[in-house]
Image (cartoon, helix red, strand yellow):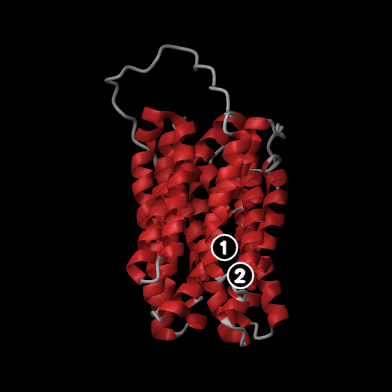
Amino acid sequence: MTTVAAARLTRDRPTWLIYLQLATFATYLYGLAAALPLIRAELGVSQAAAGLHGTTMAVGGIAAGLALPALTSRFGRRAATWAGLAGMNIGMVTVALGHALPVTLLGYLLAGASASVSLYAAMAVLSDHHGAAGPAAISEANAVGVTSGIAVSYVFSLAADSALGWRAALYIPVVATTVLALAMGRVWVPAPAPAPGPAPSAGAPRRPYGRRFHVAGAVLLCCVALEFTFNLWAAELLAQRTGLTAAQATTGLTAMLAGVAAGRFGGARLALRHPASAVLLGALAVTLAGWTIFWTATAVPVAYAGLALSGLGISVHFPLALSRVIAASGGRPDAASGAASIWGSLGSGGGPFVLGALGDGFGTHTAFLLVPALILLACGGILSSRSPA
């Protein structure tokens, strides 16, 4: 396999701040993923209607992507990340207090838009702060994040069967954000030194992105669609195929997230030594193997094994696909992160909605054939847009 010169990842205090902000972000993401089948059961809506929650998150993410370059330019990345976390918590409280579909959709919209601002601003910070080790830092940050996601999924399972009810678990991000702000609110990444040479003219024309950038964005879309399809609908399929209740099936996310966490920590090391494209192709193959086991399983242990293997592959999809978008941006990480938010949001909203609609028409099991189709599209995009270097 082709290798690259090994980079070194330094985990300083500002890096840990970003890591923990990502962990807080994950409590929202996996919390709302675990909540979706419970919302559907409580409100008695169809799969397609429930899938609209993912669509509203996507709309919010697209809005965030369009606004992110201007927000970071006007207020800075630090303010953008903290404001994003605050808005995310407002959305979570809205979902927790809502008992009608329009209210829960509004909560998902607010949380999705705000969290996307925080996520993509933080990823641009990590990429700049760590240079050649940026892909590894992004992968490791997501590993820390998904570890908290495992805990949240488990808490949802416990809360759903307790007197508190599953909605109590939606307040976890609020608590986590408050604790982090009190503990590390004064920490931030030092500003990078200005690049040598003359400053760009204010009236200079904007350089268009090349083909590699747009194809890398399409690959990111496929990868995010894969992850959110599993996040939002794997529990539904697990319940249908094994006979578990909706509340019990949310534990399947824990198995998948365990694979994601292990893969992201390991993926960070691979990203220090091998090209992102090569590692991403291998990860997509692992996901296909895991999907095959999960899709054909009717026994709970086998389904869990398939979900864990799928998670292992999914683990590096987002961080490495995002790194490829930033690398192809021509030195414009903030603008690239904004564009990535749009691509990613199209995937996070489109993938689950399409699967939900297919599930209403053909059943969830048949609808999950969307997964290998997305994997093939992503592989084709990677092979056609790899850097010649």
Relative vertical location of residue 52 with respect to residue 65 in this rendering, above or below: below
Residue 330 in view: no
Q: Earlier in the sequence, mark 1 or mark 2?
A: 2
Residue 140 is drawn in which quadrant?
top right
Q: Residue 301 at x, y = what percent?
A: 72, 79
Please name the amino acid that badge 2 sits on: Ala
185 or 293: nearer the eye?
A: 185
Mark 2 lies on residue: 159
| Residue 198 located left or right of residue 171 | left
180 or 66: nearer the eye?
A: 180
Relative vertical location of residue 109 with respect to residue 253 in this rendering, above or below: above
Please name the amino acid that badge 1 sits on: Ala
- Residue at horizontal 50 percent and vertical 45 percent from the top: 119
Residue 114 in view: yes
Residue 353 is drawn in which quadrant?
bottom left
Relative vertical location of residue 33 with respect to residue 275 in this rendering, above or below: below
- Residue at horizontal 57 percent and vertical 75 percent from the top: 235
Mark 1 lies on residue: 169
Q: Which mark is residue 69?
A: none
260 or 103: nearer the eye?
A: 103
- Residue at horizontal 40 percent and vertical 29 percent from the top: 75
- Residue at horizontal 67 percent and vertical 54 percent from the top: 147
